[in-house]
Amino acid sequence: MTSSLQSLELQKASLKKEAFRSFKLSNSNGYSAVFLSHGATLTHFYAPDKSGEIDDLLLGYDHLKGWQDDQHFMNACVGRVANRISKGSFPLANTFYQVEQNSQEHCLHSGDDSPLHKVNWQASLLQEPHRVGVKFTHFSPHDTGGFPGGLRITLYYWLTEENELIWEAKASCDRPSVINLASHSYWNLNGQSESSILDHHLQLHATHYLPTHHEGIPTGEAKAVAGSAMDFLQSRNIQEALNHNDPQLLASNGFDHTWIVKGPIHTLRPVAKLTHPESGRCMELLSNQPGVHFYSGNSLAGISGKENVLYRKHQGLCLETQNFPDALNQNQFPSAALLPGQEYSHLMIHRFSVES
């Protein structure tokens, strides 16, 4: 396995005169991944199909400015608190905190003040037997974006000889804080074409999901998926699922919901399986998080992406393993609080294969 530093016209390229860094990791089976220190972003992931043709399976941009101007959290680490916080406010240690309301009346992915997907992370290459990786680190000071506590985050990406892409986040704080990190990668297993993800098949290892109000905030209940548009217990065509006349889908213009992953929280277990029958590509997902948020790319229309492709609705999808949205305000959800002396640990594994 080899690793190399790759330049993408990044030296002193930002408005702040920061030097961004780019890394490329490869294994001996034709898989490779490219990373950017801006947002700890996975910019490209190359994989073979059943005929051996290699293509990039991630949406995104060809130039740094696209990543800097991006408004869709493309392939970055999002947080401090991914997903939505109702009214942008929450209690912690007998104090109420107010953060930015950047999505209607709510906070989405920690707002636009100083979110993790816009900072330049420290980065370095790593090498171990049978895998190579990139280590990203960042310290987010107390009161960044209105969030309490100084938060120290270490993020690892690994590419293995077993064709696994591993994402692992660890964090600690210097005073009571909150955290819910997520990888916001947009996948299309058919690669850089004008095709959408509607011909993909998806399986989710979840018997229940979280219904939402019309602005994407969970109602607080857990609802069984059986017999509904949300039932992905068996592998299912995404186009067929979207054709359901379901009020939840109509309100969010597609899938933008969290499923409760089966099995004990904080243990690594199967989450999802995404397949593209035509190419034969398959991506299995495992994680130790309570939920997985499936976003079907409902707002991608009109984005000028890689290779001058004009993206359209459902061009890509996100499978974000994470805690439940608005867990800071809903006591029945797993806690998103982090206290001094505790360690936040989030592990997510993508396993790639080709089916004939």
Image: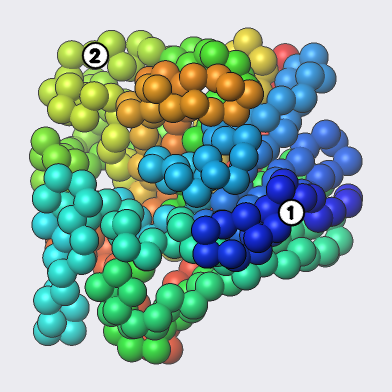
Can you identify the residue that label 2 sits on?
244
Observer-nearest of 102 and 327: 102
The answer to whether residue 121 is left or right of residue 303 is right
- Counting from the top left corner in percent of width and height, residue 161 is at 81, 46
Question: What amino acid is found at the position of numbered circle 2 in the picture?
Answer: His
The answer to whether residue 199 is left or right of residue 338 is right
Quarter holding residue 332: bottom left
The CA span between labels 1 and 2 is: 42 Å
Q: Is residue 181 positioned above or below 247 on the image?
A: below
Q: Residue at x 40, y 81 (%)?
A: 141
Q: Secondary structure at mark 1?
A: strand
The answer to whether residue 144 is left or right of residue 70 is left
Q: Secondary structure at mark 2?
A: loop
Q: Is residue 284 positioned above or below 313 on the image?
A: below
Q: In this rendering, does residue 1 appear at all? A: yes
The answer to whether residue 298 is left or right of residue 219 is right
Q: Which mark is residue 228?
A: none
- Counting from the top left corner in percent of width and height, residue 204 is at 42, 34
Q: Residue at x 81, y 45 (%)?
A: 26
Question: What amino acid is found at the position of numbered circle 1 in the picture?
Answer: Phe
Other-residue count near label 2 (Cα within 10 Å), few / some / many at <14 / 14–19 / ≥20: some
Can you identify the residue that label 1 sits on?
23
